[in-house]
Amino acid sequence: MSYIAVVKNGVFHPLIGQKVYYGGSWHTLSATDSMFVSGKRHVIGDPSDISNVRDDRGSFLVRGFYSISCLYFSSNGFKMYVCGTRSCGSDSFVYQYALSAAWDISTVSNDNISFGPGLENVPHYTLDGKVIITCLHFSPDGLKMYVAGIGDSIVYQYALSTAWDISTATYSDTSFYHGSEDVYANGLFFSPDGLKLYIGGNNHKTIYQYTLSTAWDISTASYSDTSFYHGLILAESPLDTICYGPLFSPDGLKMYMATNVDETIYQYTLSTAWDVSTASYHDLYRGRHVGNLEGLYLNFDVQKMYTLVGIEELHQYSIIA
């Protein structure tokens, strides 16, 4: 008989039916597997549980910004994007960075590429005459980009002729109005198949769910009459609290939210995958480098979490189940 186990501190831990992280990916162990690990630390449990993460001590200073509002990475981990303004009262842009080692922010360098107002085919979403970008998302192949901001309650869709290179983005003449639910979007997320869209409405502290009849075509989105109010968790937070998210686990069974005031990332469990109406509070992460949060990004393929704190500090964590 094969034994599936990890020996830790002299204790034998059977693992049949559980998940273990080795060889760069997660595996569900069965009775036909054989593994005996001694002297090495393996991650065991739920790979999408962020209640226990390890600070990698990796950091990068995103310099030169007056304010920053979002954070995103390419699917291969070699590109990073932030949205921000360079001075008080100026328009905000999307800025592109390169990583020489995938997912390692200590290797970040500036691509000197930006995307925003004043460029060809870029619509304006304004607040007091200024463009304020608060949300950013890409299709998995990096050929479509979605941007939302404060002012007109619209998600705009762009096409990139070169994947993940925002200098090649052009407006697709495609958009979606979400102001009937909330005029202030501070989170934008698509399901992996591009058939569901989630918008974090900051004014009402509610996640709204939409259905796309054509994958990744934002013009085909319609409200699913499905939402989740997360304001009860934030009951003691100031009224001007800014909420970031939602983000989801790859299977759609967990959802994550954060705020800029309480040094906490909130984790919810969905009883039905990708249906936010079935969400319930599960756990939280509270630790270093999550106060004054301005951006959050999770990647469960490589078990990494990234936080953008204040106006320049980017930090990296490993997710340990």
Image (cartoon, rainbow, N blue to C red):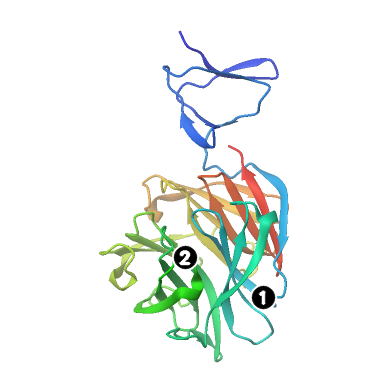
Query: Which x, y percent locates residue 180?
Result: 38, 77
**Residue ranking furthest to the top:** 1
- Does residue 159 sit above or below 228 in this rendering? below
The residue located at (56%, 90%) in the rendering is: 128
For residue 91, say whether it is visible: yes
Q: Which mark is residue 37?
A: none
Label 2 crowd (10 A; few <14 / some 14-19 / many >=20): many
For residue 234, say whether it is visible: no
**Residue ranking furthest to the bottom:** 129
Quadrant of the rendered structure where residue 139 is? bottom left
Query: Which x, y percent locates residue 147?
Result: 46, 73
Quadrant of the rendered structure where residue 42 is? top right
Which quadrant is home to the C terminus? top right
Quadrant of the rendered structure where residue 141 is? bottom left
Q: Which SS class for mark 2?
A: strand
Residue position marked by numbered label 2 in the rendering:
137
- Does residue 308 sit above or below 320 in this rendering? below
Which quadrant is home to the N terminus? top left
